[in-house]
Every structure is written in C-alpha cells, then in structure tokens.
Amino acid sequence: MKPGLALFTSLAALSPAVASPAVAQAQSGEAAASALFDRLLDNPPALRVFLKAMPKGGDLHNHLGGTPYAEDYLRWAADADLCVDEGGTAIVAAPCPDDRRLKYLGERAPFAFGKLIDAMSTRGLQHGVGANDVSGHTQFFSSFERFGPEAPDTEAGSMVVARQVAAGDRVAYVELTHNPAALIAATLGAATKPLDASGLSAFYDRTMRDAKPIIDRAIAELDANEAAARKTLACEGAQPDPGCNVTIRYLAWGWRDLPPAQAFTSLILAFALADRDPRYVGINIVQPEDWVIARRDYDLHMAMIRFLGQRHPRVHRTLHAGELAFGLVPPAALRDHIAKAIDAGAERIGHGTAIAYEDQAAATMQRMARDHIGVEINLSSNDVILGVKGDAHPLRLYRRMGVPVMLSTDDQGILRTDMTNEYLRAAREQAMSYADLKQMARVSLEQAFIAGESLWTNGRISSAVAPCAAAFTAPACRALAKRSPKAALQLKLEEDYKHFEDVIAPSLNNMARP
C-alpha cells in the first residue's frame, strides 16, 4: 500500500520546531521566491514565465490519447495520406479528392485546416467560436470521435509528445491513462449478454481463461511503441531529448458506457494487465459519468471494481468520480458517486468536482483526509466541460478539509492547456500561494502509484524520514533514493526546488519592476 498523507497545514505556516532540519533547510530559499510570486500575480505573462520554470512534481491525471494537440494528429494523419470528411470536421480514410487530402489542406487551405483543429479540440469554443451551438461538454467528448483512423505513428508519437510537453513544463513524473489496441479490440469484440452482480465470479473465470494472449499482445504493443518513442527522442544517443528524463507509468482503463458484459471485460483486462506489467501502476474507469449507461450502471461498475480489487490486491485504483455539475444531471446522480468510488477501493479520485452536492459531503472529505485519498484537480477541464470554475470549484474546500490535492492536466491537447497553465489558474483563480503550489507538487509525488519507500514520514510532507531528517544531502538519504523510485523522484524535486529558489527565481526579479 502507498504511504498516506496528512496535509492539514501549508508548509508556509510550519514553524522550525515542527519541520525537520532537512525541511527547514529546504524552506530557507522559499521566502524570496514566494515574495516574487506575489509581486507577479497581477502580471499573468510574467507569472507564467516564473511558473513555467517552477518544478511541478507529477501529473497523475493525463490521458495519452488526449495529450497531443490536434496539429500533432493531423501531421501523423497527413503522413499516412488520410483525408478530411466532406463536412471538414473529421479525419477519414482514403481515397478522397486531392482537395480533401490532409497534406493539401495543411499546405494550401489554412482556414479549412483551422476549422478541423477547432472540431478536434475545444480551441474554437474557448475563443468564442461556436459557443452558442454546442456545450463545452459535447465539444470535448465529440472531439475524440473526429480523430478517425489511427495513423501508424499515432501511439508512439503521442508518447513522444507527452514526454516533451512534461519536460518543458518541469513535470518529472506522469501517469498516462492508456490502453493498448489489444485491450480495446478484445473489449469491443466481447459478447453483450446480460450480466449483473451475481454473475461476476463466473464471468471473471471465463474471461481470464482467454486473457493471457490478449495481455501478451498488449505488452508487445507497448514495448514496440515505447521503443519507437525512445528512438525518436534519441534517448540512447549522445544528445537525448529532455523528455527522456521524464518518468512514465501507465493506468489501464475500463469503459463505463458499454453494456455490462463489455464493461466488465474491459475492467478485467485492465486489472490483469496492471497486475502483470510493472509499467502499469493501476487502473481507472473512463467515459462521461453523466451518460445514460454510466449513470444506470454506476453501482454495478463499483461492484465490479470492488470484486476485481479482491482478485488483484496489488493493483492500485484511481477512479473518475464526481465529474459532474449541478444541472448537468438529475439531483439523484449527484448524491454519492464519490463516496461509492471510495467504497470500491479508490485510492485517489479523479476530478471530484461535485463533492459539495453529495449527501454526506463532510463525512466523505473527513474520510478522505483520514485515509489519505487524494483528488486529482483539473481546473481547465472542469471549466470547459462542466462550467465549474472560480469560487464554484471545490479545490479550496478540499484543502481546508485536509484532503490531499494535486493539480493535473486531464486531456491537455484537446483542452489546449498544459501544467503551467493549471498552476497559473490555481494562482489567479483559486488564490493558491507559492507555498500552496509547492505543497501540491510534493503531494503529487507522494500520491503517485510508483513503487518504493517515500521520502516523507507517513506521508507528512513536513517530516522527512529518518535517513533524510538531518539533510537531504545525507548519504543515508541518497541511499534511500537509490533503492526507491518514489524517493528518488521526491529527492530530485527537493533538489530542483533548491536550484529554482536559489538560482532561477532571483534571475527573474527584473520582471517585478514597476
């Protein structure tokens, strides 16, 4: 099990008597960086420069398929000689007239090309184009349907983009929600016969008898795509791309808007893959929580996940839950989805936007704080898809209740965002201080499902474990980092913060001049 978190107070409020010597030493350069941050708050371009250089820990809620921008997909589709449909809003297979080939569109029809980008992302809606015709929710989820046939370079290329964007954003660790094609094909090819909670055990046994070759193909596919991505990034060469240094792990996912037998098949295969391949550190469940089948079968899906957690106890669970808003669904759908996800074994909650509408909201948050169940906060996503932002967003409520929270990007390509933008929004829209952002970055690595001992005592970010209590540079602390992937990432983050606060932030002081 991962260590817990008890984050009831900001690091900025810790006294030297509370913090261990190592943490007190790490805080010594924080005051000046924090003061500069405060002076830049009313200057968004300058604040972005500051925040882009700031180390950010991990991105724990990031879908591989939604990470590349539409322009990336269109480049891969053009290389594969794919086409645009007659309406100009989706990629389709060849053949087609020359003026509908994507190579032609990109080089000779920039306005048509721009229309396609708007259709494959939320760019147009975010800039007021078509806002009266379609909701952010519909535009976001329909964007994925317009990608069309997958080009040969799509998956490996997406892995390249994910690494490069993370490196440029000073994100050291990413958990990518990603299923190899073998899992998707097996799920969509599964029977759709009736299934209820009483039949889970027999269905599981039948499915697992045939699962090994599917998992074999999935692992081989990931092997090939990762190798291709590393080759593109020149990771074994003399001048590797900075993206090579980003640590990547994966979350396999199940579907929540398929008939029960197919949904359970998807979850069985996700758990089986995560149990076998150490690159997969957990599972999730995807598709809109407000769709008809997702709402109708919510309790059944939680029963499936709870059942599979008993069969695969090593597999971590983070679950999209409470990705809802008042008025989006009937009131009954807002009453308990987050609480039920926790009952199903969720160790983290994705989004959690509707917590204030749950019947037992305070008790659920108290439980999350006590059991160290974190929330992956996606500010841009919640704004665009749900219309929840500013004072209506529960980020500050979660923090006041002592729930571990961390910022993440969700589908950064579709949403046209990045982690720096999420930090910027947290600062300007949610009144997060520099110390708050720094704490959330540390929380992200503490909450990460990557293996190994933590740098922190029982997840308390203010208290380093014994080998690191005197100093993060102590030989015993270095030894811990060598044997623990989690501690290694955490120690590197502390080192990066020291460099940022002692060297980089002071070099940016001129931006704060009148």
Image (spheres, rainbow, N blue to C red):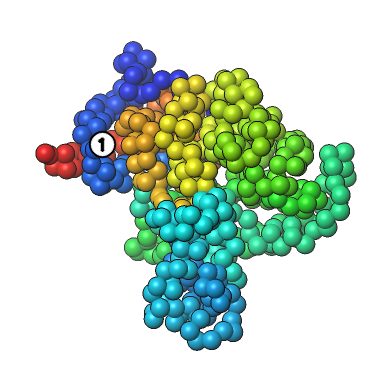
What is the quadrant of residue 491 in the picture?
top left
Residue 466 visible in the shown view: no
| Residue 133 coordinates in the image, percent (x, y) | 51, 57
Picture residue at 86% right of the left edge, 49% below the top: 194
Q: Residue furthest top?
A: 17
In the image, residue 139 above or below residue 498 = below
Residue 246 visible in the shown view: yes
In the image, residue 410 above or below residue 125 = above
Q: Give the labeled residue for mark 1.
A: 41
Amino acid type, residue under disc 1 in the picture:
Leu
What is the quadrant of residue 430 in the picture?
top left
- The reply, left or right, for residue 284 in relation to residue 194 is left
| Residue 92 coordinates in the image, percent (x, y) | 58, 74
Picture residue at 64% right of the left edge, 44% below the top: 289
Q: Secondary structure at mark 1?
A: loop
Picture residue at 36% right of the left edge, 24% below the top: 11
- The reply, left or right, for residue 256 in relation to residue 147 is right
Q: Nearer the viewer, residue 190 or 85?
A: 85
- The reply, left or right, for residue 511 in relation to residue 105 is left
Name the image quarter holding the C terminus.
Answer: top left
Q: Residue furthest left?
A: 514
Q: Nearer the viewer, residue 79 or 229?
A: 79
| Residue 478 coordinates in the image, percent (x, y) | 40, 35
Name the image quarter holding the N terminus.
Answer: top right
